Structure formats: C-alpha cells, structure tokens
Image (cartoon, grey):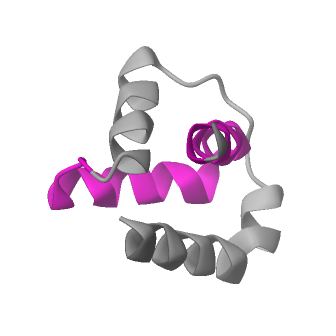
Amino acid sequence: MTNEIDILDRFLQQFSPEVGGRSSEALTSEMEGKLRQLSAGQLPEQERKEVSRELLTNQNAVDFLLKQLDG
C-alpha cells in the first residue's frame, strides 16, 4: 500500500502545476467512494484510470484524496 501511495504522490507532483489550473467541480458521491477505495488500495485497475483523469482535472478530487490519505 505504501508503494502505491508513493507512486501516486510522485504522479501528482509531476503534474501538480497542471492540476492547480483545473476546475473545482463538486465531487459526486460515486467519485468520493472511488477515491476512498483508492486511498485504501482497493480500487480495481480499470477504475484507477478514471480516477486518475479526475485527479488531473479537478482540484477538489486531489484535496479529497489527500484528506483520505492523511486521516
């Protein structure tokens, strides 16, 4: 699990300036659930792609995921 968090952290750092300039749309409850699964290391591979796109385009998704990982 720690390895996946490290990979995600490096991924987000690589694209962070781009993420910061994206939208701040409200997250659906479905996306929040997927982000919770991702933070727990339980999100299936195919759904990770969808979540990755959301993380690249929505600052609220990044913030939500960071809160999940922190707490």
Report which quarter residue 64 is drawn in.
top right
Look at the image and give the residue range highlighted in magenta.
42-69
Q: Nearer the viewer, residue 1 or 10?
A: 1
- Tell me how many marks there are: 0
Residue 60's quadrant in the figure? top right
From the viewer's side, name the closer residue of 38 and 26: 38
Determine whether 3 is above or below 24 in the image: below
Foreground pick, 8 / 58: 8
Residue 37, percent across and down? 33, 39
Determine whether 18 is above or below 27 in the image. Answer: below
Q: Where in the figure is residue 1, as x and y percent of width and height?
A: 35, 64
Which residue is situated farthest in the top direction here? 29
Q: Position of residue 61 (x, y in %)?
A: 60, 41
Q: Residue at x 65, y 48 (%)?
A: 62
Report the predominant secondary structure element of the magenta stretch: helix
Find out whether residue 65 is within the magenta segment: yes
Where does the image place residue 71, in percent across and percent down from the top left?
63, 36
Please, is residue 36 above or below residue 50 in the view?
above
* Residue 27: in magenta span: no
